[in-house]
Amino acid sequence: MFTGIIEEIGVIQGFTKNSNGATITIRCSRVLEDTKIGDSIAINGCCQTVTKITSESFSADVSNETMNVSTLGDFKAGNRVNLERALTPSARIGGHIVQGHVDCRGKYLGDMTFEIPDTEAKYAVYKGSIAVNGVSLTIAEIKRNIFKIAIIPHTLENTTLKDLKYGEYVNIETDILGRYVEKFLSRQNNNITTDFLKENGFI
């Protein structure tokens, strides 16, 4: 679990594809502190398990599934990425609850505006939280499947969002609370329907 508060911008040293996915190596410093093999680090919002550590980098194995649903499959050596270590029990949650499970890819339309698939748009709400490349942000405007985020200068300066170019794709994770609410209401409606059918002798 993460908060969407980026700790450091890392640089990809190597990205080698294989039959199972790919191995990625990222040069960094801060997120290496207290990190052990087996720990989780979010790379542009994708939760990945650390498989190797050196004094100036860490490596992770990226599955084919992760590359299919996120932008990790497009990575190249030299790319800058947002990094965040997983939460500890004593950590403050400065952003919002982020799982590190990317829901879809979004397209950057300029001026901090993004387009996402219609299937995911229902989870994006005005003044709600959303993670873009792992950054916890607030939706300032939304119309159908296009939303604009509110961002302060500090966040822009300390993440890779300032590097975005028109048409570039980003990783999107919508607020998990919306999915739980949808599931709950769906079950409630199913229960109501079942009760109605029973009371009226249909089942």
Image (cartoon, helix red, strand yellow):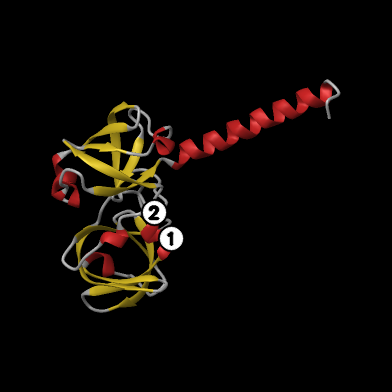
**109 or 158, nearer to the observer:** 109
Give the amino acid at mark 1: Glu
Q: Residue at x 59, y 35 (%)?
A: 184
Which image quadrant for residue 196?
top right
What label does residue 117 carry, if any?
Answer: none
Name the residue carrying label 1.
Answer: 65
Residue 124 x %, y %: 38, 34
Which image quadrant for residue 201?
top right
Q: Is residue 158 left or right of residue 90?
A: left
Residue 139 x %, y %: 30, 32
Q: Residue at x 35, y 27 (%)?
A: 144
**Farthest right residue?**
201
Q: Quadrant of the N terminus?
A: bottom left
**94 or 2, nearer to the observer:** 2
Q: Secondary structure at mark 1?
A: helix
Residue 45 visible from this viewpoint: yes
Q: Is residue 133 left or right of residue 165?
A: right
Residue 86 position (above or below residue 138): below
Name the residue carrying label 2.
Answer: 69
Residue 86 visible from this viewpoint: no
Contact check, label 1 and label 2, Cβ < 8 Å: yes
Q: Is residue 169 left or right of residue 172?
A: left
Give the amino acid at mark 2: Val
Which image quadrant for residue 88?
bottom left
Residue 69 x %, y %: 39, 54
Residue 38 position (above or below residue 195): below
Say few, some or many: other residues with alpha carbon within 10 Å of mark 2 (under 14 / 14 to 19 / 20 or more): some
Q: Residue at x 60, y 33 (%)?
A: 186
Q: Secondary structure at mark 2?
A: helix
Q: Is residue 169 left or right of residue 61?
A: left
Residue 118 x %, y %: 40, 35
